[in-house]
Image (spheres, helix red, strand yellow):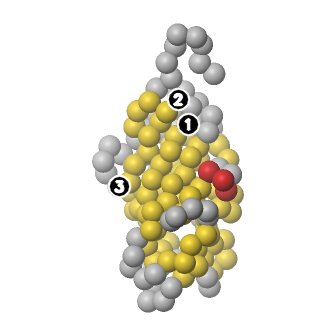
Amino acid sequence: MSQPGSREPTSPIPSAGAGNPISVEDNALLFVLRSCRRSGRIVTCAGSITNKTEKRRDVILGYNSNAVDELGNQYAVPDNQLKLGSGGTRQDLEPDLPVNFSVSVNEVDPAATRISIVLGYGASGLGPAVPRLC
């Protein structure tokens, strides 16, 4: 909590690195993390997921998603802090059509300057998996 008269930072947090998107392909899904912004103790990141197969796939975000800062603090990311597409955590993804996602991380240590997002997901034809987006 901030003290009266003090201000908590509202700024980019270098996770997707100052305008440099980070991408990871895992199980024929391309995850791109475009940006992360801090507002006080909340970090919100935005990106997209693209289905790289030739058929529609059902994708679900969640599965113990979390974040870890460079100080070693780990933060749980409950499903209600994940959004895929028009809302919720589940979406049918068409081939080669990126769909936006967002993730919010609460109570981030004010001293943290970097955060890694560990985005758990499941997809049709696949059990739970976890790509790490730094």
Callout 3 amino acid: Pro
Which residue is located at x 52 percent, y 10 percent? 5
Which residue is located at x 46 percent, y 26 percent? 9
Asked if the residue under mark 3 is in contact with the one under mark 2, i.e. CB atoms within 8 Å, the reply is no
Q: Position of residue 105 (x, y in %)?
A: 58, 43
Which residue is located at x 45 percent, y 68 percent? 99
Determine if residue 25 is in view.
Answer: no
| Precedes in sequence: disc 2 or disc 3 | 3
Q: Where is mark 2, residue-wise?
A: 40
Q: Where is mark 3, residue-wise?
A: 21
* Outermost residue toward the left in this view: 19
Callout 1 secondary element? strand
Q: Position of residue 129 (x, y in %)?
A: 62, 69
Foreground residue, 80 or 128? 80
Query: Eyeballing the image, is 6 above or below 99?
Result: above
Q: Position of residue 65 (x, y in %)?
A: 63, 56
Callout 1 amino acid: Ile
Asked if the residue under mark 1 is in contact with the one under mark 3, i.e. CB atoms within 8 Å, the reply is no
Callout 2 amino acid: Gly
Label 3 – label 1 distance at C-alpha: 20 Å
Label 3 vs label 1, nearer the camera: 1
Callout 2 secondary element? loop
Question: Badge 1: how crowded within 10 Å, few (<14), some, or many (20+)?
Answer: some
Asked if the residue under mark 2 is in contact with the one under mark 1, i.e. CB atoms within 8 Å, the reply is yes
Q: Position of residue 19 (x, y in %)?
A: 30, 48
Q: Which mark is residue 42?
A: 1
> In this rendering, would 17 be left or right of 110?
left
Query: Eyeballing the image, is 5 above or below 103?
Result: above
Which residue is located at x 66 percent, y 53 percent? 80
Question: Badge 2: how crowded within 10 Å, few (<14), some, or many (20+)?
Answer: some
Label 2 – label 3 distance at C-alpha: 23 Å
